[in-house]
Amino acid sequence: MNKEYKNLLVVSNSRSGSTNRLSMESIIEIENLTDSSIITQSRDSLTASFHDIKKADAVILGSSENFG
């Protein structure tokens, strides 16, 4: 039986690095799943391209808490 892989894109932006660390921890946990069929990619919000987003089956967005 062939496994169907899904592409997950994690896009984050962080001034202090906290959001980036959270994003990386999320990716590590997903990749450690026993029977994972998820291919993960991580991009900074300034370097994520249209091609990255179009290729993804799902996107996780992370940003800092700067509202003002």
Image (cartoon, rainbow, N blue to C red):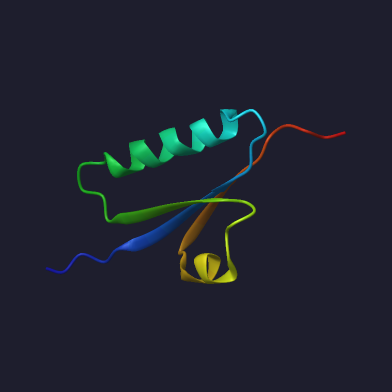
**In which quadrant is the N terminus drawn?**
bottom left
**In which quadrant is the C terminus drawn?**
top right
Residue 16 position within the rendered picture, expressed as x and y whole percent measured from the top left: 64, 28
Q: At x 20% / y 64%, what residue is drawn? A: 3
Query: Where 52 sits versus 17, above or below?
Result: below
Residue 58 position within the rendered picture, expressed as x and y whole percent measured from the top left: 48, 58
Return the residue nearer the eye: 40 or 17: 17
**In the image, is 66 to the left or to the right of 23?**
right
Query: Where 40 sits versus 18, above or below?
Result: below
Return the residue nearer the eye: 64 or 17: 17
Query: Where 21 sits versus 50, above or below?
Result: above
**In the image, is 7 to the left or to the right of 58?**
left
Residue 9 position within the rendered picture, expressed as x and y whole percent measured from the top left: 48, 55
Residue 6 position within the rendered picture, expressed as x and y whole percent measured from the top left: 35, 62
Q: At x 78% / y 33%, what residue is drawn? A: 66
Q: At x 42% / y 33%, what residue is drawn? A: 25
**In the image, is 36 to the left or to the right of 14?**
left
Q: At x 54% / y 36%, what residue is drawn? A: 20
